Amino acid sequence: MIIFGRIFLGFGVGFANQAVPLFLSEIAPPNLRGALNISFQLFITIGILVSNLINYFTTNVHPHGWRISLGIAGVPALMLCLGSILICETPTSLIERHKVEEGRKVLRKIRGVENVDDEFDSIIHACEMAKQVKDPFRKLMKPVSRPQLVISICLQIFQQFTGINAIMFYAPVLFQTVGFGNDAALLSSVITGLVNVFSTVVSIYVVDRAGRRILLLEACVQMFISQVIIGIILFKELKTTGDNLSKGEAIFVVISVCTFVMGFAWSWGPLGWLIPSEIFPLETRSAGFAFAVSTNMLFTFIIGQAFLSMLCQMQAGIFFFFAAWVIIMGAFTWFLVPETKGVPVDAMVDKVWKQHWFWRSFMIEDDRPDVKVV
């Protein structure tokens, strides 16, 4: 029954992860798109924190504490269901389905001004281009779509190979390993959850000011240092399975874990969803983002299944494993991830991909006329 329920839950989570970032990217003005989209990640981190708190308080409720933890998950699901009834469609979605005047009306409503002609014309143009593509998945396989597809898939893979889900899934086990008791381990998970929430708030404030690339690169340095420090301490002190760290060293490990979570939460966490949701042209946007979401779910599953065994076999070496991946992520970002701050979603091809030193060579097949944007 639990497995059956988890399968249904997986469908719901998959649909939400596909729909919400695209919805936010389409309704957001370019100068606020990053902050508005990252609010999605903010409420995910709040959900993680709340779930950690619930687990902390139900751990001693015998024998049905675990049932309470699972059952309460129905509350946010009900909120999402009711909220979906109340919100409007995006202007792009309405215009794409031939509800042109309704799309103009919604655009005026969400922008708060009467004169939306320039943006409206840009959306009309993008929808006309999208109509010419009969099979978006086939278009996605062409070289002209390769930059967006490669970056979207790689960001999702790298997001998981930071080690964040492994650390968040098994934080209680990790803290028990370094000497905390059961309750203290769960409490430490609550602490990392709080760090996750407040760091995501930082990302909301910074992302449309500093840009995407600087956050990704800074976080790579921060996460690499944190992983190496944790790995060195554990490698040095936990020579046998039964050893525990001293109190000071255990606290330092928790601080290093929090520093790692902090770096992830204002960069690779939210930007792993933001960037793929904003870089695809309309004709391949849903199909491309579907690939990104599917990749994320697949590698979340792989890391979740493998981490505990890897931790047992590699012990402290697991942190050096993830640190090596952070170096690869940093190099990928430096050379191949362009800045998208402030660029309208329907102008990405002309203003981003055709200007990039490497990806512009894939744009030679693009027969789209220049997009009219202000």
Image (cartoon, grey):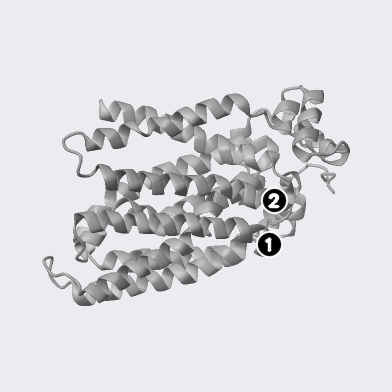
Q: Residue under label 2, please give it.
A: 32
* Label 1: which secondary element: helix
What percent of the width, then of the height, locates residue 83? 56, 29
Q: Is residue 199 above or below residue 255?
A: above
| Left or right for 80, reference 316 | right
Q: Is residue 104 above or below residue 111?
A: above
* Label 2: which secondary element: helix
User: Is any atom of residue 143 visible in this view?
Assistant: no
- Is tag 2's residue or tag 1's residue first in the polypeptide sequence? 2
The image's mark for residue 209 is 1
- Please name whichever residue, 83 or 34, is drawn nearer the observer in this view of the structure: 83
User: Is any atom of residue 8 visible in this view?
Assistant: yes
What percent of the width, then of the height, locates residue 2? 26, 29
- Please name whichever residue, 55 or 342, is drawn nearer the observer in this view of the structure: 55
> Residue shown at 22%/44% (left/top)?
59
Question: Residue 96 sits in which quadrant?
Answer: top right
- Please name whichever residue, 159 or 324, is drawn nearer the observer in this view of the structure: 159
Figure disc tally: 2
> Residue shown at 71%/46% (left/top)?
345
Marks 2 and 1 in Cβ contact (< 8 Å): no
Q: CA distance from mark 2 to mark 1?
A: 10 Å
> Residue shown at 69%/39% (left/top)?
27
> Residue shown at 56%/34% (left/top)?
19
